Amino acid sequence: MKTLECIFKIIAVILTILLVSCEELTELPINDNDTKTLVVDGMITNDTMPQVVNLSLTGSFYMENEAPRATGAEVTITDNLGNEFPLYESIPGKYVTPTNIAGIIGNTYTLTINYEGETYTAQSTMPRMADIDSLSFRWDNFMETHRILLFAQEPEGKGDNYMWQLSRNGELLTTDISQMMIVNDEFVDGNYIKGLEVDFWEMEYNILAGDTITVMQYSISKRALDFFAGVLSEYNSGQVAMRPPANVASNISNGAMGLFHAASASRKTIIIE
């Protein structure tokens, strides 16, 4: 079983090379004038909670400040059954559903954004869910932190893709894509995953006795996997630090950048003793 864990880690390391798809790429207008492009960061899950879509704008190549937020947009999510979920702007650029809702596995969700006279859409189908059986932990003498171990049955049938996020004492630890493990099931299809370390092995999270750790396991689409692989590729090349990613597969229409996707989720919590 240790071999399966090693395979998962190898996949995560080489993901940026192997998984960037041949789907349509959108070129960002990188320039030093005032041209701005809408950037979308949105997800709907089967976890009952307010669902969130973040909207921002690209700016000049030489812009040093944080990306400006896209305010005043009309944002809705609809499903293939005719249900409509309007979102409201809770803080500048952050749009949330007014009540807790949960997506349904197998349903297709369409995001529609009306912003400054333009309409942008994206669509995603929620993939099947793989449940977390349990969590454990071990002490890492070298990094002086506990490592979080996940146990789960990987469903039979290739094509499943996963992303993990960790929270400690209610605070999100994996705050950006470079800190998350994101893999597919190409080499572990149908196997039982025994003791996969889901806290990224290069990060120093300083997880100590008494901490309450929550792991969120997301089953994501191939389109989302390709998008994150593209972002990681640019991040590792140093491009993201200098400018918005220029060659990352986007599923947003009308020339916008970013990603809207549906993901099924499984959550487990453990107290470090």
Image (spheres, grey):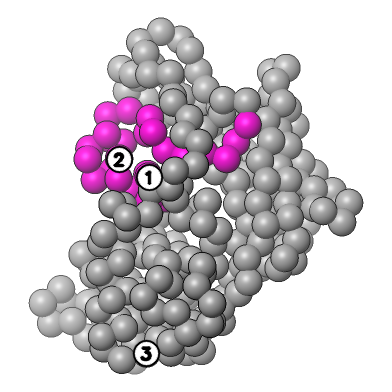
Numbered label attached to residue 230: 1
> The residue tagged with tag 3: helix, strand or loop?
strand
Q: Residue at x 75, y 32 (%)?
A: 74
Q: Residue furthest right?
A: 82
Q: CA distance from mark 3 to mark 1?
A: 29 Å
> The residue tagged with tag 2: helix, strand or loop?
helix
In this orientation, which residue lies closer to the viewer: 171 or 76?
A: 76
The answer to if 250 sits in the magenta stretch is: yes
In the rendered structure, the answer to whether residue 80 lies left or right of residue 194 reads right
Any part of residue 32 in sight: yes
Numbered label attached to residue 234: 2
Give the magenta part as a residue range: 228-253
> The residue tagged with tag 1: helix, strand or loop?
helix
Q: Residue at x 43, y 89 (%)?
A: 192
Name which of mark 2 and mark 3 comes first in the sequence: 3
Name the amino acid type tagged 1.
Gly
**Disc 3 to disc 1: CB gap under 8 Å:** no
**Residue 256 percent location from the top left of the image:** 56, 29
Identify residue for label 3.
194
**Residue 25 percent location from the top left of the image:** 46, 34
Name the amino acid type tagged 2.
Glu
**Disc 1 to disc 2: CB gap under 8 Å:** yes
Q: CA distance from mark 2 to mark 3?
A: 32 Å
Quadrant (top left/top right/bottom left/bottom right) for the C terminus: bottom left
In the rendered structure, the answer to whether residue 141 lies left or right of residue 26 reads left
Q: CA distance from mark 1 to mark 2?
A: 6 Å
Name the amino acid type tagged 3.
Lys
